[in-house]
Image (tube, rainbow, N blue to C red):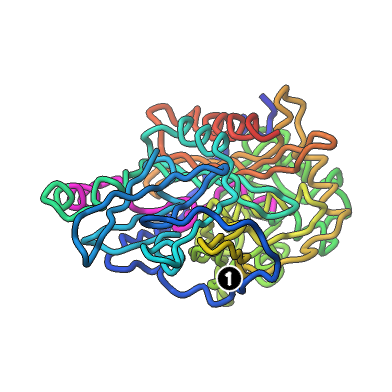
Amino acid sequence: MHATITGALRVSGVLAALAVLATGCGEDSHPDSADKPSTGSRSPSSAHRGLGDILVGGKAVTGSKATGDTRIPYRRTYSAGSLYAPVTGYRSMLYGRTGLEALYDDVLAAGGASGDVVTTIDPAAQKAAFDALGDRQGAAVALDAESGKLLAVVSTPSYDPAAFSGRGPEDVRAWKTANGDADAPLLDRALRQADAPGATFAVVVAAAALEQGLYPTVDEATSSPLTYVLPLTRTRVTGASPQCANASIRVALRRSCDNVFTKMAADLGADQVRTMAEEFGFNDDALTVPLRVSESTYPAAGSTASQTALTGIGAGEVAATPLEMARVAASVVNGGRLVNPSLVSRVTKSDGGTRQPGAAAGPAGQVISRRTADALRSVLDSATDTGISGQAGETTDGRGGSAGAWFIGYTDRGAGRRIAVAVRVGALASPAGEGDEAARVAERILATVS
């Protein structure tokens, strides 16, 4: 496997888990005021006798069952509920609503106005990611780098929203079990959990170095001793191999050279690295897809030089969601252009009217020059049979143990779509294989959409 995939980078950092176990109507129940009715026309859809549906690949993944209760006449049912839970959220007679169920309650609720919410999810990509991650803690996001359409949003371990959609004792038990599970199945790790991104963040640092002219090309030798001492400390960071001494950006990414990127971040300074990170979408607390996305963060002003150096390898106070790192990969393969991600393609009402979701909040546009994007692509591109390209990195739990691994990558097969992906897997029994495992999950996803 390509060196940027097999070269796993161990870093230390604070894992900031933004777990939200929503109750009641959930925090995604804010009105989607940006949605506006479409002026176009279409054939009226079949009237719903119950709740409106959420569609994936043109097929409903939700349904309705009559309850005989005039107050709440229908109970929500789900097909492949665990697979699509991060997309649909849940609709419970006892515990309210989250996800698209909450955000589009005005459309999905039973009654004459019921309609459908059509998602951008690719069912094959979603299932490939879900099956590859299995029951371990992990997340995967795949998106079309040019349009921003989200093709997969997966979080594991998951839960079946049908288990507590009613109001019987079995629903209460299922709810308590889900909330009491140490693996936090109700947490959407793809959109709502920000962790230290490890060596995948080195792509952002490399972009800053090229944009600021610290190094003119990815093949220029850097000024990086094999063992770098963090400023004003005795902490030593040693490259993974002798080739890391004064390694170019190309070699440093391929060989996981901690010494290069810690020194590079220190040389650039916190302000320049932060500016680059924010161009990619870090420190944005308003991103919606239209579901709310937790903020990915780069530390504010006031960091010491040694703290800034550690951010070069995605440690310290750097935290990113899988969605954010997928956006970084998408920008590289998309010529330096960042697009806003979207999960909903349209909303169709029972009267035949349609509306498009409002524009996603968040930065977009040319975030790095095409020259820089092409240079980074020349590094990340690999010669594997799948055509997948990317960067892997591991994180530690702060006690010397493994906390898991990341992989960000993309595929671009000629006239085919440019698809970006980010995968995070939790710690494995054999930490040495974690970087490879994250890459294998990405390969399985991209194989379905290439």
Q: In this view, does 292 lie above or below 236?
A: below
**Which quadrant of the rendered structure holds the C terminus?**
top right
Identify the residue at horizontal 72%, vertical 54% (top origin): 147
Out of 178 and 204, give the one closest to the viewer.
178
Q: Position of residue 361 (x, y in %)?
A: 61, 71
Magenta stretch: give its range: 174-203
> What residue sits right under mark 1 in the picture?
284
Q: Quadrant of the N terminus?
A: top right
Tell me the amino acid under the disc marked 1.
Answer: Asp
- Of residues 365 and 231, the one drawn nearer to the viewer in this rendering: 365
**Image position, residue 408 (x, y; %):** 62, 43
Residue at 71% of width from left, 36% of height from top? 389
Task: Pinpoint residue 113: horizontal percent, then vertical percent.
Answer: 45, 67
Q: Position of residue 184 (x, y in %)?
A: 31, 49
Camera-nearest residue between 54 and 343: 54
Asked if residue 234 shows in the view, the reply is: no
Residue at screen point 38% across, 55% down: 49
Residue 209: quarter of image: bottom right
